[in-house]
């Protein structure tokens, strides 16, 4: 008997008992639905996070003082030696760090910014002029300060988009307006694009000024020997393939500059975007295993449900089986008929599950506008294949039983 | 014993049973259901196998129907020995050579008449279009040309049994094996069904074997075999006393065979 014929018989048998068929599928539906929904949401979150990191600037390395250690901050290693502008200039030297494309330094601190009676507390980023280039970030109004502004220690400031909205609630044109930073007058020369939240705080709620101006006029936080102290150095690398090499070169350079002895620990940290992404990758990996376990359990339960109903169905249809055998059905024909029925049941359940999961993912996406759930074709195909395989596996025993029925007894069965 | 019947001249018997026995093991007890049955049935015969319950007639029917194999003895169906075949081989024989009609019809519920009739053709591996045509032809032959797409619950008992007869005919088997075919029908419908069998037997030469304990069914047959305690008690070949022959016989004369045949052809 052809498989197509068996499929038609199976569809008819399932349609004859619609409610029971749906109830039987429920385990598979829920299992597949949960997996599709959670996987889609997971993918969406992953994509969102990756996009956020990509927004930090391409092929970026972060160099920060101290070691990132586990445990609460109070238990961390002793106060760390700062990085300086000199470190940044050294890293910018292509003879030492061959693959570096651009470098910027950033000194971060909290400041109060006021204008026309409004005061906000935001993060100040006192940076070198290359900052927008390295961070892959532009202004929407005006421009970032220039090397000349920096060299002349000009009191100019670029506002983060939210800071601009807070200080200029009526969308006044901000250029050449004056704001006070910690009481000192600064001229606004630009507003940055909105970047949104991300690792390291919301940069839209900050202001940007030249490192020289900040350290010489405002914060006065130079190192004892007069160097410009910085919080973090950004180095963008020409190609992602060269990141490990660049990381190694910078490490060697920094150890040498800071006089760290052979075998002693670094007292600075270099983090690549990939490091950050891989942390999220680990979290998502754990989540995936967890989801897999849920899926396996619900598919197992669903499979047992299918086996149970198929056994009932075989008993109920004993006479049908007897008749089919009497008119010439071979064992294999009966076996295939019931196997296909179980597989059809599971496959339809899988399809409904996919639809359900997709719907759930869409609803969640709509609720949390930040990210869009991604329903992957691979997840859909895998779910359907696994669901059908579950149907096949749990259908074997009932189908085998049906195929072994003796037609004489089966025909006489009441 | 050889049946003395006009159709024996040189033809291969449809059924040739030689010294058939069947022993069932019921716990420690051996039950001898059949103790040595010899029987030949020739093409075109309409034969009733009768016997009280426990006589072994059901066992004999299962063996004749290739649903079961004998413990000893040989069974040749259309000249081919089928007494030692395996399950799947028997299934193929049933599919090609035997049409079953049951007391309780055994139609698939929620399935149209034509789909029910197609069933044996599915297992014969016939393609969909040809199958449908053959099934429709078989249904027309039993007078259900206007009920092709009715489901069993939309048909009367007599109509359901006609569907079952169409299903038995559709594979053009060597014989139809009918197990108490009128057991679930009222008298009037029973007569219709038995006359249908007679018509198929006479017009199409189809060999029909009834297994019954109902003497009225036997009256339509021209040969009656009685079984008792696993042995053939009697084997009687005679003129059918009921049905399309008998009715005309009463109307015309006590020996109106020729006249009936003429009338029959005119119908």
Image (spheres, rainbow, N blue to C red):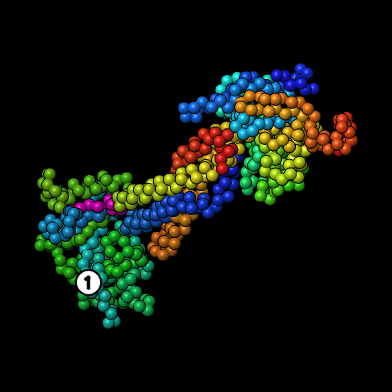
> Along the horizontal axis of the image, is A366 left or right of B115?
left
Structural crowding at the residue carrying mark 1, measured as other residues with C-alpha within 10 Å and reported as few (<14), some (14–19) or many (≥20): many
> Along the horizontal axis of the image, is A6 left or right of A393?
right
Please give the name of the residue rendered at 38% of the width and 46% of the height, measured from the top-left corner. Answer: A296
Image: magenta residue range: A268-281
Q: Is residue B91 visible?
A: no
Q: What secondary structure prevails in the magenta region? A: helix
Please give the name of the residue rendered at 25% of the width and 71% of the height, measured from the top-left corner. Answer: A122
Image quarter (top left, top right, bottom left or bottom right) of the C terminus of chain A: top right
Q: Is residue A52 visible?
A: yes
Disc 1 secondary structure class: strand
- Is residue A275 within the magenta segment? yes
Label 1 marks which chain's residue?
A
Residue where numbered disc 1 is placed: A111
Q: Classify A96 as above or below B265.
A: below
Image quarter (top left, top right, bottom left or bottom right) of the N terminus of chain A: top right
């Amino acid at each position: 008997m052809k498989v197509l014929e068996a499929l038609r018989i199976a569809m008819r048998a399932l349609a004859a008992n619609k409610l029971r068929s749906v109830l039987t599928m429920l385990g598979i539906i829920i299992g597949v639905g949960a997996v599709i929904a959670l996987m889609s949401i997971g993918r969406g979150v992953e994509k969102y996070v990756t996009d956020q990191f990509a927004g930090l600037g391409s092929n970026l390395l972060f160099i920060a003082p101290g070691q990132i250690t586990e445990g609460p901050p109070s238990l961390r290693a002793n106060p760390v030696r700062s990085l300086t502008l000199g470190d940044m200039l050294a890293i910018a030297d292509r003879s030492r760090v061959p693959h570096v494309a651009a470098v910027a330094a950033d000194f971060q601190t909290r400041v109060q910014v006021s204008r026309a009676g409004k005061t906000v507390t935001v993060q100040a980023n006192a940076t070198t002029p290359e900052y927008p280039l390295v961070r892959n970030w532009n202004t929407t109004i005006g421009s970032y300060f220039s090397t000349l502004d920096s060299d002349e220690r000009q009191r100019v400031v670029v506002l983060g988009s939210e800071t601009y909205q807070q200080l200029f609630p009526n969308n006044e044109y901000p250029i050449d307006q004056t704001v006070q930073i910690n009481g000192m007058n600064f001229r606004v020369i630009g507003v940055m694009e909105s970047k949104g939240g991300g690792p390291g705080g919301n940069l839209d709620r900050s202001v940007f000024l030249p490192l020289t101006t900040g350290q010489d006029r405002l914060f006065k936080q130079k190192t004892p020997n007069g160097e410009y102290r910085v919080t973090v150095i950004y180095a963008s690398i020409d190609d992602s393939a060269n990141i490990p090499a660049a990381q190694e070169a910078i490490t060697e350079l920094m150890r040498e500059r800071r006089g760290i002895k052979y075998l002693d620990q670094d007292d600075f940290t270099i983090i690549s975007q990939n490091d950050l992404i891989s942390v999220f990758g680990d979290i998502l990996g754990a989540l995936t295993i967890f989801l897999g376990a849920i899926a396996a359990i619900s598919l197992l339960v669903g499979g047992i449900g299918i086996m149970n109903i198929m056994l009932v169905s075989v008993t109920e249809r004993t006479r049908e089986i007897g008749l089919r055998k009497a008119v010439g059905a071979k064992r294999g024909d009966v076996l295939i008929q019931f196997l296909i029925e179980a597989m059809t049941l599971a496959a339809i359940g899988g399809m409904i599950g996919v639809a359900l999961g997709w719907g759930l993912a869409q609803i969640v996406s709509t609720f949390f506008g930040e990210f869009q759930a991604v329903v992957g074709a691979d997840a859909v195909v895998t779910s359907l294949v696994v669901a059908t395989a579950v149907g096949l596996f749990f259908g074997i025993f009932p189908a085998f039983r049906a195929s072994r029925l003796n037609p004489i007894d089966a025909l006489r069965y009441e | 014993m050889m049946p003395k019947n006009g159709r024996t001249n040189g033809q291969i018997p449809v059924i040739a049973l030689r010294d058939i026995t069947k022993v069932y093991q019921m716990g420690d007890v051996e039950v001898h259901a059949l103790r040595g049955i010899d029987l030949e049935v020739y093409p075109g015969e309409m034969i009733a196998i009768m016997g009280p319950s426990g006589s072994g007639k059901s066992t004999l029917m299962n063996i004749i129907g290739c649903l079961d194999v004998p413990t000893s003895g040989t069974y040749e169906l259309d000249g081919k020995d089928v007494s030692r075949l395996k399950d799947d081989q028997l299934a193929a024989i049933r599919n090609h050579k035997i049409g079953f009609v049951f007391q309780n019809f055994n139609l698939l519920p929620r399935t149209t008449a034509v789909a029910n009739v197609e069933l044996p053709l599915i297992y014969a591996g016939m393609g969909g279009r040809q199958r449908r045509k053959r099934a429709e032809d078989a249904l027309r032959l039993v007078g259900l040309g206007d009920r092709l797409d009715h489901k069993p619950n939309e048909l009367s008992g007599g109509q359901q049994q006609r569907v079952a007869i169409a299903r038995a005919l559709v594979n053009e088997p060597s014989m139809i094996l009918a197990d108490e075919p009128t057991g679930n029908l009222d008298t009037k419908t029973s007569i219709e069904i038995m006359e249908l069998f007679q018509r198929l037997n006479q017009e199409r030469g189809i060999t029909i074997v009834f297994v019954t304990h109902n003497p009225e069914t036997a009256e339509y047959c021209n040969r009656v075999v009685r079984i008792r305690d696993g042995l053939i008690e009697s084997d009687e070949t005679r003129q059918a006393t009921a049905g399309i022959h008998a009715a005309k016989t009463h109307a015309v004369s006590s020996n109106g065979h020729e006249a009936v045949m003429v009338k029959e052809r005119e119908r």
